[in-house]
Amino acid sequence: MKKLAAMLLTFVGTVIFAACGGARTDSNEQPKVRTDQPVSARQEQAAETPESPENGTLVIYFSRTGNTGKIAGYLTEIAGADSFAIEAAVPYTDDDIRYQDDNCRANREQNDKSVRPAIADPVPSLDRYDTVFLGYPIWWGEEPRIIDTFLESYDLSGKTVIPFCTSGSSGIGTSEKNISELVTVGNLLKGKRFPADAAKSDVKEWYDTLPLKERNEDMKLKISVGGTELTASLAGTAAAGELAEKLKSGPVTVTLNEYGGFEKVGKLPWALTKTDESVVTEAGDIMLYQGNQMTIFYNSNSWSYTKLGHIDSMSGKELEKLFGEGNITVTLSY
Ligand SMILES: Cc1cc2nc3c(=O)[nH]c(=O)nc-3n(C[C@H](O)[C@H](O)[C@H](O)COP(=O)(O)O)c2cc1C
């Protein structure tokens, strides 16, 4: 009950804080990232794989009381990623984060957007990562200032960045906006707020919906049509990721009906996330139609679809011949 009351106070405080625009208080400003320290044991996982290709995933996070760290741990396992814990050069003591005290360090820092607390041991390089999950607790409705130190210390202009956070009750909203306004990010995906007690399955459920292009492009969908095996590259949509995930449980056979002289279309066993766009399809395109149907094009059509993938190395004529005139049965596997 006491905790609930405190959290409520925090939430109300956040709103009041935001409404007041934040008062300038004593700054705890410190020099930017230090580079004169040895790489700590916790960072070796990220630092010791220089030969890994430049398409890796990094989970980087700051967590003072362990909640965000727990989510980061789940995410690291699920994504098969490297991980890196951001630690403050001057660690945050319990008194520093006693937010009921207006003058505690965390409150003073959050109250001054220019403060950049130094990071103890910065990650040596982000070169080999093109996907960065960035985790933090919500402090007064925002990301802690040490996250701003991280953001301003690296070039994220070519990276996909996915924020995630934990909080007592607040959403992730303002922190995402802050990130986008503070630095240039190649592709800033919509972030996710978790409660402190989120389970690994909650994290996995979210992860599976992410349109991670690199992940999807590596996957080859297999399509068997009357004894001919085709392969298809998956699109970078959430639906394509979901389809691949579903097929990991086993192949699925779908009956596709002839339609319009340009496509074969049939119902999938499940609905997938619809992110329809008006497109002109090409022969070989595999599209999600109305959220639960799959169309394979052997010719072109203009309509609103969500892209699932594209069949490799087959012309429209070859596909038309293979599919024949009537309905077909295809088996999808991954
Ligand atoms: C200084 C400070 C400010 C906080 N502000 C908020 C807030 O605005 N909204 C909220 O829901 N929780 C707030 N919290 C609670 C934390 O977001 C929450 O406990 C979080 O899970 C802590 O993550 P960590 O264990 O990774 O440090 C605040 C905590 C601190 C220390």
Image (cartoon, rainbow, N blue to C red):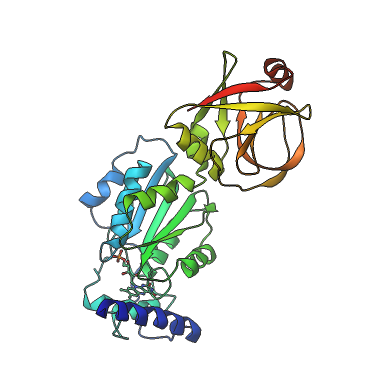
- Report the quarter where the N terminus lies: bottom left
Residue 308 in the image, given as x and y percentages of width and height = 59, 37
Residue 207 vertical placement versus 253 (above, below): below
Q: Quadrant of ligand 1?
A: bottom left
Q: Position of residue 303 (x, y in %)?
A: 75, 42
Q: Residue at x 28, y 56 (%)?
A: 70
Identity of the residue drawn at 54% across and 66% down: 181
In the image, farthest residue toward the top: 227
Residue 155 seen anywhere in this rendered image of the structure: no
Number of numbered discs on residues: 0
Does residue 134 sit above or below 143 in this rendering? Answer: above
Residue 201 x %, y %: 35, 49
Q: State the residue in front, 328 or 157.
A: 328
Asked whether, in this view, residue 239 is left or right of residue 80, the answer is: right
Where in the figure is residue 276, as x and y percent of width and height? Answer: 66, 47
> Which corner quadrant of the image does residue 57 belong to?
top left
Image point (23%, 53%), residue name: 38
Residue found 40% across the figure and 56% down from its top: 134
Evaluate whether residue 33 shows in this view.
Answer: yes
